[in-house]
Image (cartoon, rainbow, N blue to C red):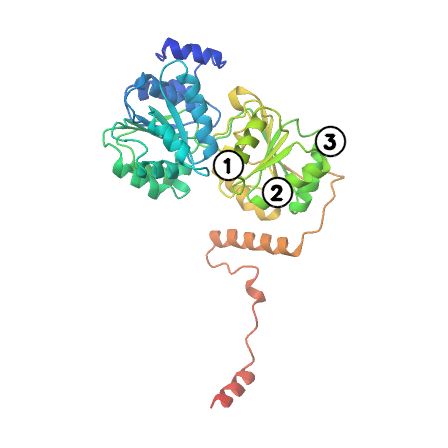
Amino acid sequence: MTFEDLKVTRQYLNVLEEMGISEPTEIQCKAIPRIRAGQDVIGIAQTGTGKTLAFLLPLMAMLSHAQGKGPRCIILTPAKELALQIARVAAELAGASDLRVQVVYGGVGHRAQQESLEEGCDLIVATPGRFMELYLRQAFDIKGIQHLVLDEADRLMDLGFMPQLRKLLEVLPVKRQNLLFSATYPPKTEEMAGEFLLWPTRVEASPQSTAVDIIEQSGIKAPNFGTKLNLLEALIRDGDIPEQALLFVREKDQAERIGQRIAQAITSSVRTLHANKGQNSRINAMDAFKAGELRFLVATDVASRGIDVPRLDMVINVTVPKDPHDYIHRIGRTGRAKRKGRALTLVDPSEMAALKRVEGLLGAPLMLTPLPEGVEEVPTPKWEAQAMARAVDREKRKADPTFKGAFHEKKRKPSSGKGRSGRHKGRR
């Protein structure tokens, strides 16, 4: 099937040609006709398979041309970076028409965004909180909204956005088309989606939550975070990590430790990306990384979804994510647009349960190798050993609610009967 077969108009065919896109992907072939037909659609496809164009192409064709001042289409995303990326693609497509695209997100002042919206727009890409804030400030009229898109719908519903989304539903026009897109779609999210869609059509381009086949996945065992730092340095020095790599961790302080280690020992071409970073800092770091000006980007899961770095060769999970779906999104930053990619995961003993959940989602075990010779294994600090023990306890308690934990036996022993008797006599 070609884009012509999907009835993509000539103006957008020319833009796709300029973007270097000649053939539609599976999700685009399945979703575009149904969206054009006005159906509510749930779209599930592996990351990097063209979900953004799968909904933008038909929606912008239906919007056709600039009309009125208020928006007719809203695209909601869980992250600012993803909102910016979608808006860039939409703006590129809109260059072939007079459609007006605006992007709004938190972390920056609202005044400039409000003034832009008041000038008129046809399509808004937004994070939910900022969208509701600007609506309450009467920055735009929502009576003309005909299309609502929830991109990365599982994350929107899982990150505490449900109250905001419910408030949004109360004010949006009842007659509208609803689209939900994501790489993963767990049962809980499917149940919650019943609040948004009426008789939806489900299109799935590949088995749900599977990793892209062209991504080579492997893992290395390490006893603690300090040893992982030594391992990273050794891999970079030995040339086992390519010129550009995206590193993921669970926590902000872990990202900073890795960034400092790489900057001190290897290269200054490294930046960190997490929630404590200012909005401009996050945008500049991502833009530099996507442009190839930055060799290493160390991020928490704020960057794992929807970020398109077309020529990224490798993703490194320095820590295993607690949610196995986050693993799919992390490694999906490589192997995009049919390019080969590598994903390496470093695993300590406290992360084995999380790894098992990842393997259950993948449907196959991850090949783990021991720590390579020559990598210094550092002693585990007391605070880290305790944190790891507690993490193991939590996992065991999930599996067995009667499990009392490694720290249970260390509780203070009760006083002897003689001591208690003496105290009672004293109180009398």
> Horizontal and vertical percent for residue 142?
28, 31
Question: Is disc 1 placed on a helix, strand or loop?
Answer: helix
Question: Which amino acid, mark 1?
Answer: Gln
The local secondary structure at tag 3 comes to: loop
**At 26% across and 37% down in the image, what residue appears?**
171
Identify the image quadrant of residue 15: top left
Position above or below: 277 against 309: below
Marks 3/2 in contact by CB < 8 Å: the verdict is no
Q: Neighbour class for label 2 at 10 Å: few (<14), some, many (≥20)?
A: some
Q: Does 180 sit above or below residue 378?
A: above
Query: Which kind of residue does numbered mark 3 sit on?
Result: Asp
Q: Position of residue 111 (x, y in %)?
A: 40, 35
Q: Position of residue 404 (x, y in %)?
A: 51, 61
Q: In the picture, residue 228 is in which quadrant?
A: top right
Q: Where residue 238 is drawn, which disc sits there?
A: 3
Per the rendering, the mark at residue 256 is 2
The CA span between labels 3 and 1 is 35 Å
Q: Please tell me whether residue 314 is drawn above or below residue 416 in the rendered image.
A: above
The residue pinned by badge 1 equals 279
First in sequence: mark 1 vs mark 2: 2
- Residue at x 48%, y 15% (from the top left corner): 19
